[in-house]
Image: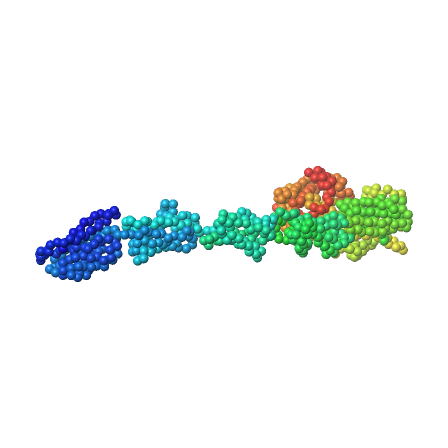
Amino acid sequence: MRLSGLATPSSAEATTISIYFRPTPTPSPTPDNYCEPPVLMGEVNENTEILTGIVEKGSTVYVVLGGENIPAVVTDGVFTLPLPAIKAGDRLVVHCEDANGNTSESVVKVALGTRGAIQVVVPAAVRLDQPIQISGSATANRELLVRMSVGGAERFTQLVQTDADGVWSVQVDPGRFHHDERVDVAAAYSDGLSPGADGEDYFLCDSMCVLRPDDQRLTEDMTIISGEADPDASLTLTYDGQNKQLTADEYGRFAFDALPLRAGMTVELSAVDHMGNTARASWQVEAGERAKITLALPTEREGYINSRDDTLILMGAAKKNLDVIVEIQGASTIVTPDDRGNFSVSLNPAAFEDGMLRIFAAYADGFTPACSAEMALTVDTQAPMLTASTIGDNEIEVTATELHVQSEPGAELILRAGLSESRKTADGQGNAVFSLGQQKVGTSYTLIASDAAGNETEQTITVIEQIRDVRIQINRPTRGEVVIGGRFGIDVFILQTAPIDLYYTITNNGEELVRGEVDADAMSDLRARDKEKMEAQYDDLEASYDGKRMRANIVIPQMVSDSMMLSIYSNDEGTEPVLLAQQPFACGAEEGIAGVDDDRAAAEMPQTVHERVTTDTFAFGLDKADTQVFAPSQVYLTGYNYSEGNLAMFFDYIIDGKRYTMKEIDEAGGSANATFKARNVGKELGELVPGLKKPNTRRGGAIMLLDLSFLPEGEHEIQVVLIVGSDQYLMQSRRIVTSSSVEVDKNVTRTLQSRWQ
C-alpha cells in the first residue's frame, strides 16, 4: 500500500498534510539499496500529541525536533512517538533506517491547531501599595504575550505560559503606574497565530482617598464641618474625647453638624474609601468674634486707691460664658462672665503697697490678646506731708500776716477759721502762702492738705501773743537742697529789735542729729544790701531793726534722707525756747565727681522737675526724692558746666544701663539738646524759680533739655556724662518713675521751650 497526500496552506499560512488510503497492487520487492520514506498517518498540528506512521518492517525510526533526536517505537512497520509540546510552524524530520542500513527522511511542518479564546481577568481598581495580580485562561500549554498601556503608551510587556489547564497569571510592579490612571490590558498568543479572540480589559489605579474640607480654619463660632470625600467613604470626626461617624453620599458630600467647638480644641477628621485608602485633616480651633474686655474700678478718686478706700469691687465685661483670667500683682484669678458677659472680683486695698498697681485681664484660653484689657492705678495710702511756718507747738504770733505751708506738690490746701476758709494748691515745689487777716489771741486755724489720691493730713494752729519782734530767714540750706553728708555750713539772716541768743537743731524724721548754740555777740553784721533786701520782704516793719548773720559749720552723719529739718530756736536766758524758723532739706551720700575739686563736689539738687538751679559745678534738674513720679514728657535735665570759658563739650546719657547720645535719643522718639554759651540765668530762670541763687556768669553756660517720652512707664535710672575733649565726667545719677497719669505744668514747658532755644 502507498500513501499520497496533498498539502494546502491554511488561512494562517500553516501547512496541512492530508493522507488518503487506496488499494495498491502488491509492491514488488524493495531493492536492497533503497529505504521507503516514512509515511505519516493523519494531519500533524500543534494539538497532535502522538505522531504515527508506516515504515518497512524491521526499520528503526527517530524524529528530529528542535535539534533533538527522539526515538520512536516501531511494531510490524508502524511507528508511534508521544510528542512534546509543539507549535504551529515547527519543523518535524522523521528519520528511518531499514534492516539493510538504508535511510530515508520525511519532513513535515506543524499546522495550526484548534485554539481557545484568551480571557483576561482584572480587578475593577487596584491600590498602588502592593503588587498588581493579572490572570486569565487560554489554550493549555501555550505562550502568551501580555501588554499593559496607559493612554496608548506601553508600560509593561511580558511572555507568560499557560499551564495544563490553560490558566495563566502575571504579577506587575505597581511603581509603573500612578493614581487615577486607566491601565489597558491585552493578551495574545505570542506567535501571532490566533484563530481564537485576543483578551482585552482594563483596570483603574486608586491609591488615595479624597478628603477636601470646605473650611481650612475652624473658629469657636462655627458648628458645622463639611466637605467632599470619595463617594460612600466612611468618615470619623474626633474632638474633645468624642467620635462622630458618617458615610459620604453617592456624590462624596458629607457634613458634621451641631458641634460644640472651643478655642484651642484639636479636631481631627479621617476618611476611608472602598479600597481601604485613608486621608486625614486636623485643625486647631481658633478664637472667634470676641468682645473686648473692659475693666472698671470705682474709687474715691479715679486712677487712685487711697487710705480711705474700703473693699473695692473690680467690674468687668467680656464674652459671655467664656473664662477670663485676671492678674493682679502676679496673682491670677479665673472668673466666668454671666449670660450678659459681666464679671466682678473683690479687692482688698490693704494688700497693695504704695506705687503703681496694674490689673491685667485676658481670655483664659490665651487667644486674641487684642481683646485683653489693662488698668493702671496709683496706690497711695500715705497722708501728705504738711508743715507750716509756725513756732512752738503749731503756734503763730498774733502779728503774723502770712502762713507759709509746704506739702506734696499739687496738694489741695484748705485753711479754715470758723465758718470761713481759704483754698490754695501747692506749687511744683509743694509751697503755698496764705494771707492772714486781723487775728485774735487764743483763736485757732484748721489746716488741711489733701493729695491727688484723696489722703488727708490735718493740723490745728493756735494764735499766741507776740514774743519778740525777730525775723529770721534761713538761706542755707535752701528748701529742696540736697547737701552732701559730712561738713557743711548753715547761713541765717536775722532782723531783730534786740539781740537774741539762738540755738539750732538738725533732725531726721524727728530724731535729733545735731544741736548747737550761737550767742548774739558771735553773730556778724548783715551787709547793708542784704538787710535792705530782707526788709523789703516785710510790710509791717515799724521799729529799727538790727541786721545780723548767723553762720555755723556742722558735721552730720553720712546718710541718704529727704526728711532732714533745720530748726532755729530763741535761747534767751530765763525764757522758754521759742521755735523761730524751720527749713526742710535733704541729705545725699557723698559722691566725688571726676575732675572736680572736693570743694565743688556739693551739687545743689532742685526740689522738683521744674526748679532750675545753677552752682559752681553742675545741677541736675530732677526732683530731690528718689523714685518721684513724673509725666514722661516733663522730665527735663538742666545744668551749668563747671569749666571756665565757652568750651566745646557734649553730654551722653546712661538710661537704664544703656548709653545714649543726643542723636540716639532723638532717634528713639524723645528729644535732646544742649546750648553752650553764657546766659543771664538769673533772669531767665528767676521768673520761673523765685529766689534763685545768682550764678557765676563768667563760666561757660550749658543748658540741657531732655524729653524722655519714649521710655515706658515705670522706674528708670538716669546718669549724665559730661564729655570735654577726651575727658569724661559722671555728673549725676538719679532714679525716677514716669507715669502718664501725672498732671504736667504745660505753662512751664512752653516757657522753657521758647526761652531756651
Image quarter in which the C terminus is found: top right
Q: Residue at coordinates 30% horizontally, 54% vertically from top-left? A: 139
Horizontal and vertical percent position of residue 82: 23, 59
Which is more toward the observer, 45 or 185? 45
Count of marks, rendered view = 0
The figure's colour scheme reads: rainbow
Q: Nearer the viewer, residue 187 or 397?
A: 187
Q: State whether residue 613 appears in this view.
A: no
Extreme-front residue of the structure: 23
Q: Is residue 716 left or right of residue 507?
A: left
Q: Position of residue 117 (x, y in %)?
A: 32, 51
Tell me where residue 716 appears, x and y as whole percent.
Answer: 67, 50
Give the image quarter of residue 681: top right
453 to the left or right of 107: right
Which quadrant is the N terminus positioned in?
A: bottom left
Residue name at image x 57 percent, y 56 percent: 242
Asked whether 105 or 328 is in front, the reply is: 105
Q: Residue at x 17, y 59 (%)?
A: 78
| Residue 709 visible (yes or no) | yes
Q: Nearer the viewer, residue 37 or 672?
A: 37
Residue name at image x 30 percent, y 58 percent: 164
Q: Is residue 485 left or right of residue 213?
A: right
Name the spot of residue 311 as percent of width and height, x first. 75, 54
